[in-house]
Image (spheres, rainbow, N blue to C red):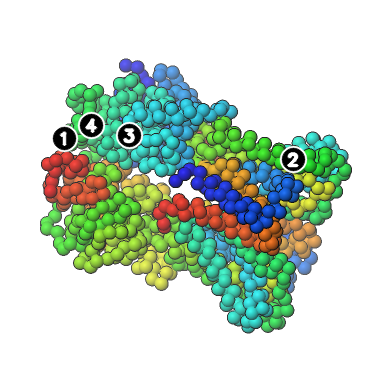
Amino acid sequence: MDKHGFKKILLRHETILFAVLVAEWIFFEVIGRNFGTYDNTCDILRHSCEIGLLALAMTPIILTGGIDLSVASLLGLCAILFGKFWRDAGMPIPLAVACTIGVGALAGGLNATLISWLRLPPLIVTLGTFSLFRGLAEAITRGVDTFTNFPDSFLFLGQDRWLGIPAQAPFFLAAAIFFWLLVHRTTFGRSFRAIGFSPEGARYAGIPVARRVAMVYVLAGIVSAIAAIIYTARLGQAKADAGTGYELFAITAVVLGGTSIFGGVGSIPGTLLGVAAIAVLHSGIAHALLPGEMAGMLTGVLLILALAGSTLPKMISSLRARKAALKIPPQAA
Amino acid sequence: MKQLLQLSAVTKSFGAVQALKGISFDLQAGEVHALLGENGAGKSTLIKIITGAHQPDGGTIEIAGERVEKLSPVAAHKLGIACIYQQPALFPDLTVAENIGLRLEGANSLSRVDWNSRRNQAQKLLRRIGADISPDAEVRSLSMPEQQLVEIACALGAGARIVIMDEPTASLTQKETGLLFAVILDLRSSGAGVIYISHRLEEIFQLADRVTVLRDGESVGTRNVCRSRGDETQTSQSESDKRLLTSSPTLTESELIRMMVGREISQIFPPAQSAPGETVLSLKNLGCTAGGVKNVSLDVRAGEILSLAGLVGAGRTELARTIFGITPADAGEIILRGEKVEIHSPQEAVARGIAYVPEDRRRHGVILEMPVAQNMTMGIHRRIFPGTWLRFGAERACALDFIRQLDVRAYGPEAPGHSLSGGNQQKVSLARWLATKPKVLILDEPTQGVDVGAKSEIHKIIRRLAKDGLAVLMISSDLPEILGMSDRIAVMRGGTIAATLPGKSGAHEVMSAALGQKGAGK
Amino acid sequence: MNKYFREFSAAAALGILLLALAIFAPSFFQPQPLLSLATREAPTLVVACGMALVIICRQIDISVGSQFAVCSVCAGLLAAMHWPLALVLATTILIGTTFGAFNGALVAGLGLPSIVVTLATMVTWREGLRWLRQGVWVDLPNGVQWFGLPQMTGQWTLVLVALAILILLALTLKHISIGRFVYAVGSDAEAARLAGIRPRMMTFGVFVFMGALTGLAAMMNTIQSPQVDPNSGTGLELKTIAAVVVGGVAISGGRGTLWGVFTGLLLLACISPALTHLHVEAFWGKAIQGATILLAVVADGVRTRKQRY
């Protein structure tokens, strides 16, 4: 790992987050029933796969200084398209999966074109596609259609275990490894950070900025599609409102994990810890028989604390500097 | 003479770093007082204290004879202190008239906005400084020099008595520099005092009455600038041009430099070498409409330094950006070692062996938040990281090598770019491009804003690179640098090459070609 | 290029839509349904004005929907306790102001990015409300709906109040210094500081103002029906941001006008009823809203296409 000033702070952030995670676990273990069991851990893992995938894809996007609010809406669109491919177009599951991923890539491509080629602000573009994708999902299903009765061999992916762990876990693990390598061990990741710190500076350094930016959004589209398929397998049904609200959790997980919303700074392990923290929180609250809404509220509070916490070192050091300056006696003329 | 400003024994620290160690400085009415010093000497801190942006830890400030405590930017503004920075602090989305209005009106929240009087006021001020800018123009659409002129209009409008100018001519054309000097002389004769910060010694000799040299947070001394005054009030533009052309290093100049660096630095440039090699880069009728480049033809040979001279706005940076692929050419040819090439992006340029060290090092040359090592390897990912896998060991080794070669002063390859001084940042920027092992190296103002010590080091490096066989195209606005470093000089004017001169040419010939006067070189 | 190109193109788009309706579905132009539409959208207009200020100041607030919901429910509960309506109004605005102040304190005081702060507060308030109310609607006593006035009077009151706020704010933004300060801070906060404007106070202020307007809008919404839906305000942030962006306000801050926002809101508000009258099925509404946002932003981007990467 590189060792430089800002990385040290990030490591500290991840360590704190890890400590928070451990504290959470212990807390819910104590006050909840059946919390720390293997079964429940598998459940937590199972439920966090989709958000986890979205958060993984969101990390390089935020590293480049952008954002993608449309990932969850795209999940919904891909879910019902998958259902349509399988049920109405009669495709076998593997073909439907491939076509859905293709759609995801195309949708990601729409974001990519608008953001990287036309240089439009990502916030507003993905706000538009957030609405558009969900709207298309609603329009295609006319608001009511659902897709069910998937074959058991497919549902196995979402609901059963393979070699003792939830079947979707290997996919999530593969994705996590892929993104970790991409962000931390390849020149792509290096260029994402450069673009996040200074798009102009990256351009003058010969980095193909437009291509890299396009890449992260297309990747997010593909990952959304995969998440949609896993979601459908887990729930056994595909509806237009699939994944509503997931983008918020994904962004929360990423920011919680220490990635700066302004770009350049961030890590995949941090994101994974963020996802874990949120998933454990949700599960713990359910097992402690506390109202489900508390999970949402605490997530919001946690996010603010994480953000405030990251500015704390800066404030402390500037306060210290001011104090030190006051202590030096004025020099004689 | 009335004393406008008096600083006594002012100290200022930031954490453990003592930026000012007991400085005394004064400004009289009706004088231009130059402030000179290497980067990091404390000039900006001093200015920030005068404008109220920072509070001194010790010492006193007197303005017009009255002791002032706790000077804030608003209070400073009220007391008639104005500062013109290199990066104008204007509102890009608002009009010139509104910009001037907001600055001059004082932040009274509930007053009614009088658009007409705002417009008139702007009109009047702009006319007074001779700037050809519409008050309804959006500031974003103005060029940097035009924005600086708006800043000056603000300072005039505020009736500033103490006007501070921080490297104002860095990006002005000759005409605009002339306007600026006229404004400064106007301020002086009206009884205001001007604090003028510049690295350009010839300007200091032209304008200043006194010069104070700072070094390491202390004032080394204040000297009167002796120069033949002549009839300044009647100064026409050609007069100031002539003075620019005939100014040459005097004893006082090297004394100034000695005061700045505490050691002898010769203004001697490293000697040119023997005959250059084959033509590496050849431009034939190159044009780029977006950049205003028209019909440029020139050759750069291996082992030579071809300087690209000309006034700001002549199109030199635009030409560099066309060659480098940032604003690709739409006419003419680029021929690299006899082979015609098309360059549509910086990546293509780099792949072809062209390197460009940009003018704006903070925005384009170095990514300040990233460590030195990562900045240095940013251009060579393909080579040093095969298969896109990062190799930290190889990166560190490469960085350490360049740190040694170019004598970069940083606490290590992991130091972030913003922790380095301007000169060292420039070296990192240079290292990045040297790492690409280019055939053609384009340098855009390589020593701009760099202190004298680092400047000399960079010059030695450039000459060494040429000797090693690189074809160097150097864009510079520093006449002594051009005259001292070049094997040949190409002068640009209006987007095209006006003249190609031998390296031994005189300042007069270069300037004439740049200005388009008769009797210029071929 | 004309400085107000975006506003004019939004107005042109609105004109085309209305023309299409006039030709293909003249039944759209009946006075009573139009008044009902205007009344329904009046609270949205008020919130959109606040959102415009926030965005011009280079911030964003996606928690308005949740604020709106909480304020609506509070207004309903207070009204159900037979508080005098004037007091209910004042308290609701106060509650909204408090939410705004909370956002503002985090953004201006701690320097946290507004997208994430308002994301957090959005989730927190929404979940908190859901927890406390469990989705139960609030029944309002008699005399609350339309302030006890006849329906048409009530409707006109609301529409005129919204328009009055729009005009007042538009005039302030153009002709009163503090309005110009919003543009200044949004354009370049550092330059504003040097000019003696206090960017942090301005930023705090726009969030507080946003909260106050949201509270007012919530009250305006509550008195329109005999019950309060705890899910009111869902999608409000998207709708108002869309209206603001379509109306020509730049996300990067520093530019935009309220009459553009008005046009944008009209355009978006007319789409769903237009769809109904043109016999397009209603569930295309969200897709069309998304497409409209994209078209507006693309139009902007094509016009100001500077360097590519």
Mark 3 vs mark 1, CA separation in Å: 22 Å
Please determine whether, in this image, residue C122 is positioned above or below residue B339: above
Residue appearing at x 69%, y 55% in the figure: C273
Spatial CA distance of label 3 from label 4 is 22 Å
Q: Quadrant of the C terminus of chain C?
A: bottom left
Determine the CA span between mark 4 and mark 1.
Answer: 14 Å
Q: Nearer the viewer, residue A33 or A177?
A: A177
Circles 3 and 4 on the same subunit = yes
Q: Amino acid at mark 1?
A: Thr
Left or right, residue B283 beside residue C304: left
Q: Position of residue A192 (x, y in %)?
A: 47, 60
Query: In front: B148, or A234?
Result: B148
Q: Nearer the viewer, mark 3 or mark 4?
A: 4
Identify the secondary structure beneath mark 2: helix
Which disc, if any, is residue A217? none
Label 4, on which residue?
Answer: B237
Q: Which chain is mark 3 on? A: B
Give the residue type that dot 3 points to.
Answer: Ile
Q: Provide the secondary structure element on which disc 4 rests.
A: helix
Identify whether A238 is placed above or below B283.
below
| C165 horizontally vs B98: left or right | right
Mark closer to the chain start, 3 or 4:
3
Is A266 in front, or is C78? C78
Numbered mark located on residue B246 in the image: 1
Residue underneath mark 3: B197
The mark lying in front, picked from 4 and 2, is: 2
- Amino acid type at image mark 2: Trp
Is residue B402 something that shows in the picture? no
Query: Which numbered disc covers residue C156?
Result: 2
Residue C203 is drawn in which quadrant? top right
